[in-house]
Amino acid sequence: MTTAEIRETKPAILRGLRHRCPACGEGQLFARYLKVKDTCSECGEELYHHRADDGPAYLTILIVGHVMGFALHGLFGYLRDDPLILALVLCTIATVLALALLPRMKGLVVGYQWAKEMHGFSKPRARLPEASEA
């Protein structure tokens, strides 16, 4: 990558959502469920600079909360007479959805940080030519 290249935000975010390196889109972003690899195995991009912190959890709760509101509204008419089944169905939906979305939201945040050169994801600096010894 040269210093003149501009990092596109949308492709980096989409790569993060697919658990791929935001730089090349080929290497895996995660070593485990939520553990971001230190470097990309394909392009060598350093990924340990990310500072996702609470952002992915907040985004996950925001999305799951909205989905659960619609699910409760839709399922209440069918399961009104059996509140235990309603609670179990809603808890199952919320748990599965949260576990599925959390790594994707973390990939989104890491991709965004990479594209915007935040927290150490700066562009590689051009090396100055070394002085030749006479």
Image (cartoon, grey):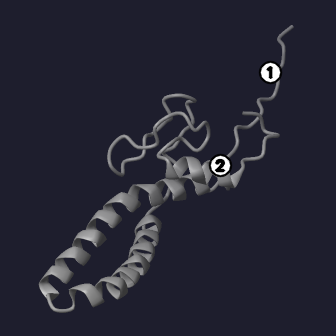
Q: Quadrant of the C terminus?
A: top right
Q: Could you tell me which residue is drawn at 14 percent across and 87 percent down?
A: 82
Q: Real-space Cα distance between discs 1 and 2?
A: 36 Å
In the image, taking residue 116 as reference, residue 70 lies left or right, namely left
Q: Quadrant of the N terminus?
A: top right
Asked whether residue 119 is in view, the answer is no
In depth, the one of 33 and 96 nearer the eye is 96
Q: Secondary structure at mark 2?
A: helix
Q: Which residue is mark 1?
A: 130
Classify residue 65 by image quadrant: bottom left
Q: Which mark is residue 44?
A: none
Q: Which residue is mark 2?
A: 11
Asked whether residue 130 is in view, the answer is yes
Q: Could you tell me which residue is drawn at 31 percent across and 61 percent down?
A: 99
Q: Amino acid at mark 2?
A: Pro
Q: Local crowd at mark 1 within 10 Å, few (<14), some, or many (≥20)?
A: few
Q: Secondary structure at mark 1?
A: loop
Classify 124 as above or below 6.
above
Residue 72 percent across, percent down from the top left: 32, 85
In depth, the one of 64 and 24 nearer the eye is 64
Classify 113 as above or below 130.
below
Residue 55 percent across, percent down from the top left: 47, 67
Tell which circle, 1 or 2, labels the residue nearer the N-terminal end.
2
Residue at the top extreme of this rendering: 134
